[in-house]
Image (cartoon, rainbow, N blue to C red):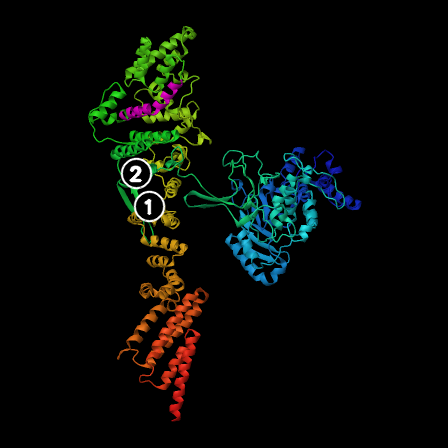
Amino acid sequence: MASSSCLPLVSENFCEDYDARSYLSPLRPDLDATTSEDQATTQHKRRKIASDADFSSHDDLKELKNSFPTLQSPDYYMSPNLEEMSIHVLKDPNYTSQVLDFTIGRCGYGSVKFLGKTDVRWLDLDQIVKFHKNEVIVYEDETTKPIAGQGLNKPAEVTLVLQSITTSSLGRQFDNVVKKLKYFTERQGAHFISFEPENCEWKFSVNHFSRFGLTEDEEEDIVMDDPNAVQEPAEINCNEISENNENSPMDFTESVLCHSLPAHLGLDPLKMKEMRMVIFPENEQEFEDYNESPKFQKSFTGREYMRTPFKDSSQRTNQKLNSLVVRKTPLALLEYNQGSLDSNSPGSILMSQPKKVTPVKRSKAEGFKLDLTHETPITLDHSCNIVDAGLFMGRSFRVGWGPNGILVHNGNLVGSKNSQRVLSSIINVEKVSIDNVVRDENSKMRKELIEFAFDLPLNLHKEMNHEFEEEVGSFNLKLQKIVFNRLMLSDICRGYIDIVEKQLEVPGLSSSTRLVLTHQIMVWELIKVLFSERENVGNSFDDDNEEDMMQDIKEDSPEFDLEALPLIRRAEFSCWLQESVFPQVQYDLGSLKDSSYLEHIFLLMTGRQLDAAVQLASSKGDVRLACLLSQAGGFTVGSTVKRNDVALQLDIWRRNGLDFNFIEKERTQLYELLAGNIFDALHDFDLDWKRFLGLLMWYRLPPDTTLPVIFHSYQHLLKSGRAPLPVPVYADGPQELALKSNTNECLDLSYFLMLLHANEDPEFGFLKTMFSAFSSTDDPLDYHMIWHQRAVLEAIGAISYKDLHILDMGFVSQLLCLGQCHWAIYVVLHMPFRDDFPHLQAKVIKEILFQYCEIWSSQESQFEFIENLGVPRIWLHEAMAVFFSYLGNLPEALEHFIECRNWHKAHTIFTTSVAHKLFLSAEHSDVWKFATSMEMHKSEIENWEFGAGIYISFYSLRSSLQENTEGSVLDSLESRNVACGEFIGRLNESLAVWGDRLPVEARVVYSKMAEEISRLLLSDIGEGSTRDAQLSCFDTIFSAPMREDLRSSHLQDAVSLFTCYLSEISS
């Protein structure tokens, strides 16, 4: 619906010559012409209305016009429409701010009536209200959604036309459909009003808006009530559109398609039309370029209709694609065949697509290919992916993830360079590279790398002091946390450094891996420098050089004054910074070929290699420069005086008009550096962030400046754009590694450690970014060392944060990928407890046990390790029970189900799968063991007396019949007959209860038990018993489930006995 020109541009004689309809009518080319008499009457009324209106100026009317709601979608309508609003606005300029019962709808889909008065000014209804199949969405973008009660986020009455239900099936399913609709309505927080079977309208009320309607599963749940029902295409009342949406051009393509052959055959005409245009290229010349706006190809009269461009058609198809879908069982697509779309095909191929898709073109022999001009967000590269079988098979197959980073999919990966791009249903099983950290430069996995990267660091972590806390729950899972003070931090960091240094000695590592490992060493050194503490406090130092102070500290284990601690820490950090930038300085020196010695000296000074710089200047005969360099960056106040002297001399030269062209540029840079003017010294010189930080600390700031002040100064310069970005080492190193993503979003871990030390805030605001994988490695899935660094910082109280589960689960995924299930559970137990997720650790551990049971259950060391962690044995046996059930090893599964106290499942497996096999194998002791182990819990087991109780009763009864001693309960034939009759009766009831769940072998066992009991009952039938008791025994036996030949044999014996009985009576 167009919204332009909905109010006239008022002139002075507007009230006399014009009315609103004269301006609105050009927007309605499809309206029927009214009679001249009606027009005259209407115009007379409009003039009267307009004459009563009082508008101050032309700008007021223009503003009112611009405030009207816009609605451009062709099959949408609103009430009141624009013409009616225009009439009301002429009466009341504030009408659009309080429209009563404003309604918007889509033909064939439904409508929404907003109750009460609604402010519709400046609403873009195309973006706010969207109708899809069996659903309506208001404010799909949550960021633009107003609070409840404002805008269109207010109470409303929703009417949806259910397009999955046929009126023919409602006669017998009406009550069931209404019941389910009430349930679906209440579950979404709405109130069910009614359901009209005549037009399949589902009406309900809502208090506010998000998404309301039926999901695909709920829709299928309703449709499954009538599986033979074929949905009729939704009838769209074009007259209703004409009446309610007067300003909208009609979509005549849909109107014609509703009467086409596909619609007559019960198919979706819009989808069939799109598939025809995509598959058969003979009409491609009729399609306009994708970038052109839709234009009409020709005018139409009568029953002619417009042929719209392909882009416009696909857009309307995306909006209405689901409205006329016919559900049929999709065929398995073994290979693509153009002829499979004919009318003789027994099924249909369902092609599902997202709401916003890239326009597709047809290639000659490569199937459907995505437009290569569009980049994908996954690889930041052009896509070469083809539409694969899964796209056509719809919901019958989807991409899935398996354990250890296994990805199951069909088709090519996005960005794949595979030249064989054909349509097929081949299922590809690939593995995501989560284990790159344990592979060498030839991508070969090395066991020693697994040991150095995972086993040794975790063993070191396990040897630290732990405190335990019990989780809230019935199993009291013991959560763990390492605890130590800062006095022990140096030794702990030294332990991690030793492990990484041993890993560097492994041959075959790539240069990028060695760079990352070196960075890990420097990070541990930095943690030791910034956060460790010393034990002794005593005399202070008065050394003139930071290196001398550090040497004395290392050699003599001194006592020092508390006030000297910041200076000592600064000296240690200075040494760390020199060591950290040393490789980069050496790399830059190696890249200088025919440069002057002054450039070499300048590079040496950026790394504070003063001795080498002084020696080089002396060797070149530049004694004065060597003297200046020897006094640069000193630790005493005198060095600051010398720095000021150099700056003063440079200033005097400038004031006196010295021509600096007679001085080498490099020498001037050195003078500027020695004067503390680092920005002038670095003019046209790119420097990494660590060396810039060093120049700031060594040559610009006073020598007694503490580390927090230094770090804050660098941070201030960084925010003002005057300092280089602290990118990670792999993006700024000599190996020229670079990130494909934006380096602004991933900064060096060392920089965050400095800020953490400067802020001294456990709730540091950058922790999530600080502990991302990109802060220390170019592998986004490598968390193995960052996890340890986080744990150490938490142990000393430097940080306190409970929302780093991404880090924990990333490390867990790495361990699981390598089959280290016991260490993965160890890591989960160190995840911090959260009140909002009290059972998080228990759920994750159970998932690991179930998914990776084959690995940890087959390795005794892992099994024992997990048990020692305090994981309940019930969880272990439950996981193994499910695993053995999956493998079909039901006896093993039965044992574990009994161990995990799942009595119902154990009883079912015993009765239907295990007991009869053991019985037929004459392993009666095992049958007795399993059955009696469950007997103590028979009150918790359903149908106990007809399952395992049968076997216990059999063995007990057989034992009693075999003993047959005087004084026993079964010492008479009558008592034995009663006991046998009760047992046989339970056998028959058991057969009825279990039914088809009992296999043939189990029924054979029941027959054998009946035969055995019958044989024992008849074995001593002639000893001191009456004929009536003997005949009664045969009656009991005839009801037993046994073979017919045995039943016939017993019948002959009964006949013989009865004959003897008659003979005795006659005699």
Tell me if 762 is positioned left or right of 369 in this view.
Answer: left
Residue 342, above or below 502:
below
Crowd band around label 2 with a 10 angstrom C-alpha radius: few (<14), some (14–19), many (20+): some
- Dot 1 falls on a residue whose secondary structure is helix
The span picked out in magenta is 568-591
Q: Position of residue 154 (x, y in %)?
A: 55, 47
**Amino acid type, residue under disc 1 in the picture:** His
Crowd band around label 1 with a 10 angstrom C-alpha radius: few (<14), some (14–19), many (20+): many
191 or 995: nearer the viewer: 995
Q: Position of residue 889 (x, y in %)?
A: 38, 57
**Residue 815 in view:** yes
Magenta-colored segment: predominant secondary structure: helix
Residue 726, above or below 965:
above
Q: Residue at x 25, y 26 (%)?
A: 563
Tell me if 478 is positioned left or right of 301 in this view.
Answer: left
| 576 is within the stretch colored magenta | yes
**Residue 1039 in view:** no
List the residue tagged with mark 1. Answer: 822
**Amino acid type, residue under disc 2 in the picture:** Leu
Q: Based on the displayed image, in which of its 4 quarters is residue 690 positioned?
A: top left
Residue 880, above or below 743:
below
Q: Residue at x 29, y 40 (%)?
A: 459
List the residue tagged with mark 2. Answer: 456
| 649 is within the stretch colored magenta | no
